Image: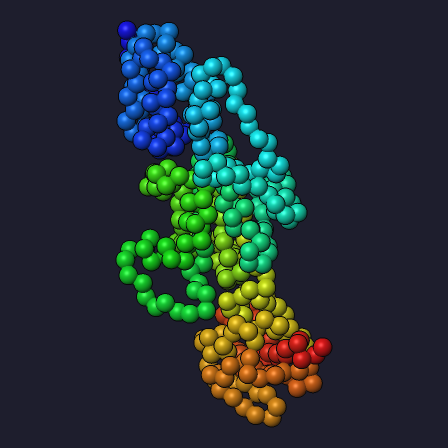
Amino acid sequence: MIEKIIELEVADPTIFYGVNNSNIRLIKDLYPKVKIVARGTAIKIHGDEEEIALIEEVIGKLEKYCATYNKLTEEVIIDYIKGSEPKIQVENNLIIYGISGKPITARTPTQKKFMAAYEKNDLIFSIGPAGSGKTYIAIATAVRALKNKEVKKIVLSRPAVEAGEKLGFLPGDMKEKIDPYLQPLYDALQDMIPGAKLKDYMENGIIQIAPLAFMRGRTLSDAFIILDEAQNTTTQQIKMFLTRMGEHSKIVVTGDMLSYSDATTMFIDTQIHDNEFINCDRLSAFVNSNSVLRNCENVTIRYNGETFNNNIRIESLKGTSDNPIVIENLTTSEEYTTHIGKNSQGEVKIWNPADLV
């Protein structure tokens, strides 16, 4: 009689043991001569050496199945103990199996294109409107890479930008402050990784939440890095982020080109010639000129023969190519003019293309 301890390294113990240890009890019933005790991630087996060798082989197969499919049923246990392979339904375009064995697949043509691009490239830009699944697919791919040991960690980042309303200062430490902005990423992770395993990953730094503000100076090697909502970054931020890639890493940048939180993300390093207008299709919906021009002094906004201060909302003005909105005296704002550009008179001329149709 000998004793053997088997550690579960990849499977989640909660799923492997089953509800009220039902899976462990089933194995006990099928091997009545052996004593089995499960605690935490350790399974202690006491019995005959040959029986223990058989159980060890079966548990290894069950653990691999459980880690792959995120579920373990009585039928699967019985099949492996009998020496046969369980029946597995083949899923087309499968990425990973989520909680309770739910298959997560690339459904749309563009999602399939993303998966094909991932296999060939280290840097992928995933652009699409809200609801297109760009973030969800990126995180599913990252979890798969982690499970397959293609990377050692997952790093998730997102600009701290509210959706239309300011929440003010948030209480708590850095993690508590940034968590509300990263909730969509947590939601996706919770669909794919069991709760106990996810908590363990985050406590041990295998899955890291990295605010964009604290990414400077890092070199991320052997990592799968995701920047979500990248349309809300500035030019300096996106350049800084893209240079964080280390050896054997993958970067996925997701964003929506039709959704901007600030005009500075719309026109990057634009050189405006005299009598040329900026196409501000989205400006009128999102930007208050006061927030855009907050670092400018002596700014003047002229439209239709009238002069406005920089508290006027640009969307209230209906500029056209014949009668544009003109912003003057931008020479004092290097930040603004770097992103937006100006002509030789220091002017930015704006019109709404909707008025030109």
* Left or right, 218 with reference to 343: left
Query: In the rendered view, would you say 25 is above or below 353?
Result: above
Tell me what residue is drawn at x 60 percent, y 93 percent: 305
Q: Residue 203 placed where, x, y %?
A: 33, 41
Query: Is residue 252 shown to the viewer in this render?
Result: yes
Q: Residue 73 placed where, x, y %?
A: 44, 28
Quarter occupied by the C terminus:
bottom right
Q: Residue 279 placed where, x, y %?
A: 64, 73
Tell me what residue is drawn at x 47 percent, y 27 percent: 65
Residue 193: quarter of image: top left
Number of callouts? 0
Query: In the rendered view, would you say 204 is above or below 63?
Result: below
Quarter occupied by the N terminus:
top left
Which sits in the foreground, 282 or 239?
A: 282
Residue 342: quarter of image: bottom right
Tell me what residue is drawn at x 40 percent, y 20 percent: 59
Tell me what residue is drawn at x 48 percent, y 19 percent: 79
Query: Is residue 151 shown to the viewer in this render?
Result: no
Q: Residue furthest bottom?
A: 305
